[in-house]
Amino acid sequence: MKTETTYWNEELRPIQVPPGWTREQDLEHFNDRRFEDCVPGEELACATRQLAFHAAELKAAVDEVLDRIYAGKPAQRVATGLLPELDRILVAMLYACPSPRANRFPQAMRVAEFAVESARRTLAYLTTPGTPQITLFEICESADWLGTAAHLVSEALLQWPPHSDESALAA
């Protein structure tokens, strides 16, 4: 019987503020992240910058994977938004590298999709008038998931066999 090694086993649940969450707990949760350059009273702006930083970090990791897939064929790479690109990466990596070493990609992509959807929900709350007030907790958790996803995607890319012909996928 073949067993599969689990690379990521944390359950991916939508980010929810714990019941009875207070403003003091929200600030404490935020301060635990050690935003040293954050001026008191500017916590929302600092947390939002962190969210943007990790979103850019994930996009860079995805771009690195796509650059390897479409090496030498940049005209075939079309910007489609992050979620469709994550799906394309998953299919391409499984096609090109069906060995157990590739099993990090499906899990990394699952975390990345979850992180992107969580961030989209968070940003919708931030930008839509009339929605309940967003907490620092939600923004920080979304930022953490984006950072985690970026790390997992980059780490999965390191498992890519150096001798494989990634550009064949773009043919």
Image: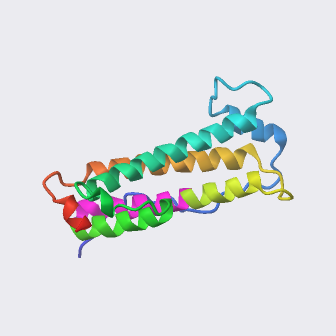
Residue 156 in sight from this viewpoint: no
Residue 140 placement, left or right of 42: left
Q: What stretch is highlighted in magenta?
A: 97-115
Q: Classify 43 as above or below 169.
A: above
Colouring: rainbow
Instruction: Name the spot of residue 116 as percent of width and height, x first.
Output: 55, 57
Tell me the chief SS of the magenta region: helix
Quadrant for residue 73, please give it: bottom left
Q: Position of residue 111 (x, y in %)?
A: 48, 59
The quarter of the displayed image where residue 118 is located: bottom right
Is residue 110 located in the magenta-colored stretch of the structure? yes
Q: Residue at x 33, y 70 (%)?
A: 91
Seen at 59% across and 43% down, the residue is 52
Q: Is residue 44 left or right of residue 109?
A: right
Judge whether 31 appears above or below 21 on screen.
above
State which quarter of the image contains the N terminus: bottom left
Residue 97 at x, y percent in the picture = 22, 65
For the point 29% across and 64% down, the residue is 93
Q: Position of residue 127 (x, y in %)?
A: 75, 53
Confirm whether residue 101 shows in the render: yes
Q: In this view, does 72 lie to the left or right of 87?
A: left
**Front one among 147 and 29:** 147
Question: Residue 12, located in which quarter of the rendered image?
Answer: bottom right
Residue 155 versus residue 5 in the image, above or below: above
Q: Residue at x 30, y 67 (%)?
A: 92
Disc count in the image?
0
From the viewer's perspective, tell me whether residue 57 is left or right of residue 128.
left
